[in-house]
Image (cartoon, coloured by chain):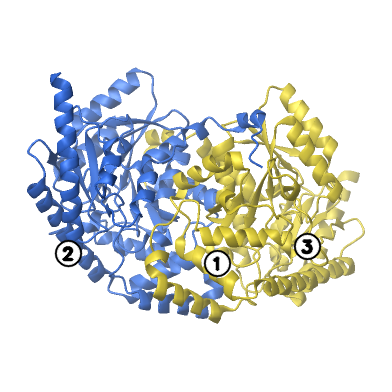
Chain colours: A blue, B yellow
Amino acid sequence: MNKATPELDCLYSARAANIKQSAVRDVFDISMREGLVSLAGGNPYLQSLPLEKLGTLAHDILAQEGMTALQYGNGQGTSELREAICHVMAEEFILDASPENVVVTAGSQSALDITCKVFCDPHDVVLCEDPTYVGALNTFEANQVAVHPVRVDEHGLVPEALQEAIVALRAEGKTVKLLYTIPSFNNPSGITLSAERRQQIVNICKQEGLLVIEDNPYGMLKFEGEFNRPMRADNPEDVLYLGSFSKIFAPGLRVGWALVPERFQRRFYLANEAVILCPPTLNQMLVTSYLENHDWKGQVATYRELYAKRCAAMIAALEEFMPESISWTVPEGGFFVWLTLPEGVDTYPLLHTGIEAGVVFIPGAAFSPTQENPNKLRLAFSAVDEESIREGVKRLAPVLIQAIAAAEGAAAS
Amino acid sequence: MNKATPELDCLYSARAANIKQSAVRDVFDISMREGLVSLAGGNPYLQSLPLEKLGTLAHDILAQEGMTALQYGNGQGTSELREAICHVMAEEFILDASPENVVVTAGSQSALDITCKVFCDPHDVVLCEDPTYVGALNTFEANQVAVHPVRVDEHGLVPEALQEAIVALRAEGKTVKLLYTIPSFNNPSGITLSAERRQQIVNICKQEGLLVIEDNPYGMLKFEGEFNRPMRADNPEDVLYLGSFSKIFAPGLRVGWALVPERFQRRFYLANEAVILCPPTLNQMLVTSYLENHDWKGQVATYRELYAKRCAAMIAALEEFMPESISWTVPEGGFFVWLTLPEGVDTYPLLHTGIEAGVVFIPGAAFSPTQENPNKLRLAFSAVDEESIREGVKRLAPVLIQAIAAAEGAAAS
């Protein structure tokens, strides 16, 4: 049965070759091994969810409204959930959203895939932060969309670099369509785009005829103080906003959404229909019921406190164990810290040395469209307890110290 | 807020223009009106599902395994469900399927979208029955895939017509990649591809280097006797098989699957990951639990008997009320009967006359890539009881009789 029929393999599309195994996948499989401390996966910590209560909500939905929950639904999502999503977004200062412009998707991953379908022809260019979310890079590649990184500093995307990139790409004859950005607590860098730059970035995109795709799964997981104001809040016609219940509730339900500028709404939800007919009805009803029947804001507050403590534990451990030649970001929310080693160190082979030492991380190259960032790595603090975080960093430090020494030795010789 | 920014509208991809509103959607919306008999929607009849029991299963999954059910899962689907799916397919004579080659998708609609991604570049040609499933046409269009219809007769696809179409398209310089077929109880025609033609069709495709996409959502809803043997059963390397729980269990869960020839398995599941990261975990666990804890084969038997009676009621009503100049298919399973009116009658404007008379159907043009079949229409018997079916057909008959008379009058004058 394993016999390949070579002449059939030309059946693949050109884009099939671009659908790459995520560099992250192997690491996740490894992370499951006994005794390892995994600082790799960005899984949310679900222990604090009211599981028994959720079971009862699901029971009641199926027993009382099963004929609806198990049937095909509207391709745009249920009106109840779209209404509820507008209330969720209002917590983050998006006050003018209409349920008509919300499209419920099979996770915000699917929303990004649909975005590619609606806006991008093969070889069109999407600009993004470098580094950026590996799942977004996979989706762009699967859609044959070209990705061009824009420089970031500690305040996020550099507006001048964005402007220059657009001009340079157009001078090369490229069609630049979208800016994809995770402005708050970026995955993987943890960096937040500053408030003043947010409007500058939107203005540049508007002037140049780009649509901003604002991906904001972590916005509510800010550790302290008022939420950051999303770019969408002040720019309803120029920003397509992606939201998700994966980080503030439960990723296993695969319920995300897009808030779409009105003039694009129709094509967007038709593309959603073409892709999945309708988002899963039971899941939409369960999310709606959870939002109605549970103190979901209290749950978010619990998450914020939990992740703040874990982040603090990670920063403290880094300060305790890491040498001066390594620097790291200090995020104000989200799941991730981004480490920079001296130039000349490649963190990819260190993955295996790390596993031998009992700790897993994700090499920086995974998050770059240019396969750059060899001397970087991502640590996630979301899924493990404070003691394990400290232990993981403690195990990682000698691996990195040794690699730096080896690189210095090689440079000197 | 409604102000369009025209210069931004060039942001659309070329394929966005191809993402069309399904002709079916308006009809579904209309179908909800009080007092109308809807013979339009192909919704399965869920009343006979054990809703209380399903509620208890969902409760137990969330209360006892919520940490798994609500978390990200494997991009290919859970191993338990993939194993169970192999047992489901074994009921239809697919005995050699390995769980390794099963990819769980967000409904088989998503599987078809992924199929387009993996195999088709823009303008590549997919061959299909004429008429065929409108949702498939939407997916092909959304992926900028060209669709070319192949002639069918009462025994399904005509092998000679398939061979001729391939040769003719290649002579025009077209790249023909796939044959998309619903061989059992086709939507919308109700026609079944005969057993002897099935292997002829696969042989032609194999010889010409096409992959067969066998979409089999209705296979188990055969009214009587042994199930039809799928093309995949004898051709594991040449047929990509699409299965679904939407018709034998519940569409609102959006759980379908692809059984992929081994050499394509890896690209296929990576594309699935790129599109949705992972299928919804809760839903997969609920389907698995339903298959394990409920007499699902008994449920399928109940559906078969129910739909057989409804189909018989529809055929009886057609015989009672329709004039001789109208003919129809007599399906052996599935949800649909396909009516042919005399040439010169266009059923599309009759949609509104029908609604005035209190009955809804779907005009034939919706199901044709060439917008042909103006003198055809689809009736669904799945979602309404026998008395309503008779009443609906009774209301429809005078509408069609009047239209035929008008067309004859126009032709004579």
Residue type at tag 3: Gly
* Quadrant in which the C terminus of chain B is drawn: top right
How far from the left and from the top, in percent, is residue B174?
A: 67, 26
3 and 1 marks on the same chain: yes
How far from the left and from the top, in percent, is residue B14?
A: 51, 33
Q: Which residue is mark 3?
A: B333
Above or below residue B203? Residue B98 is: below
Q: Which residue is mark 1?
A: B287
Rounded to the nearest whole Å, what is the CA distance between mark 3 and mark 2? Answer: 57 Å
Above or below residue A36? Residue B245 is: below
Would you say the residues marked 3 and 2 are in contact, meaning their CB atoms lie under 8 Å apart?
A: no
* B271 sits left or right of A312 in the view: right
* A144 sits left or right of B81 in the view: left
Mark 2 crowdedness (10 Å alpha carbons): few <14, some 14-19, many ≥20: some
Q: Label 1: chain?
A: B
Q: Which residue is mark 2?
A: A305
